[in-house]
Image (cartoon, rainbow, N blue to C red):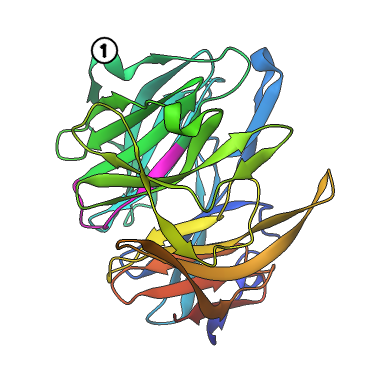
Amino acid sequence: MTKVGEGLKSVVPEPAEYYTTVFVDGKIWLFGLTYKDQKTHNWGHRVAFHGGHVVAFDVNSGTWEGPYEIPELSDEENQGELFFVRNNALHLLLYKEFLRFEPKALYTWDTASKSWQGKTFSMSGSAIADGCECNPAGVKLVDDEPSADTVTFFVNHGKTHLYEIDLNSGHVSKRCDLNKEEIINGAPVLGCKKDDKVYFFFAVHGCVYRWESGRLQALPLGGNGNPEPVQIQGEPPNFGFTGSRFTHLRPNGEWGHATGAQQVGMCDSRFVGDVHNVKFGEPAVWEKSATTLEEAHKNIAYDYSTDTLYTISDEAVEKHSF
């Protein structure tokens, strides 16, 4: 672990309680999340599209810039958001998430003007999926190489669907419906795209979610939605609930997992700062890294080009190698 800069409080004396953190073109961007009420559904959540501030840390110069205030993108009530980075650009998908999943708008972050710019957007009729009335859609990004010109994600909304966005055209489509016979009462929570397959772990819903770290599945792209069990050995992370809080695909083809929560008793949990990698093969293998993160490292970013993990706390920006 090496300190590379001062912490978040050096640029924002009173940081937001939660941030979405991404690495784009040599900079770590932190978008403060603000609370958006969902009165119709007796619910609410913290999102970036509701407006707030953003700051950026340059990993080469070790300096901060900002904060910059960003306006609200939408005041509609029933919406969720998905951040993803492809080809050195940050994108944001807005979608309707109660009653049905429906893509609504696509944006790209302009690093020069520090603003969201609308992107050409279209979708096929099958991209709208009816879902549960009482719960929001669970949208889970599938990790991929940052040079990919598509983005893939799961939508868990009663049934489970696999979606894809073509970033060249801005077209959103549903690839397939997932056959859940292999994961009864489960839903994909972590996924990565590799060798024309989407590999994923799922969690089973009971009193709480229970992550099945020893049950890796492979979903062939272009198939009929039938996942195939993949044998996996080794020591998995001791995480519960929905598994690893941060995941990323590495240049060597491994799938990185960092930090999580372990259930304590019926209603409590504790932070676990372990870092693990999945090595794909026959069988796949869990391998624990010597790197350990602290609970203060709640904001994590990853630079694919240098295979470096960054953590941003109130007091310091630090980098970690594997």
- Classify residue 1 as left or right of residue 231: right
- Residue 309 or residue 238, whichever sits in front: 238
Identify the image quadrant of residue 67.
bottom right
Q: Position of residue 276 (x, y in %)?
A: 50, 68
Q: Position of residue 140 (x, y in %)?
A: 45, 39
| SS state under label 1 | helix
Image height check: is 250 above or below 174?
A: below
Kindly identify which residue carries mark 1: 125
Q: Is 148 colored magenta in this rendering?
A: yes
| Type of amino acid at the residue the image marks with label 1 | Gly
Q: Write the start and end of the magenta stretch as one range.
A: 140-149
Judged from this view, the residue extending furthest toward the bottom is: 2
- Residue 71 or residue 44, whichever sits in front: 44
* Image quarter (top left, top right, bottom left or bottom right) of the C terminus: bottom left
* Image quarter (top left, top right, bottom left or bottom right) of the N terminus: bottom right
Image height check: is 45 above or below 30?
A: above
User: Which residue sits at x=53%, y=33%?
Assistant: 186
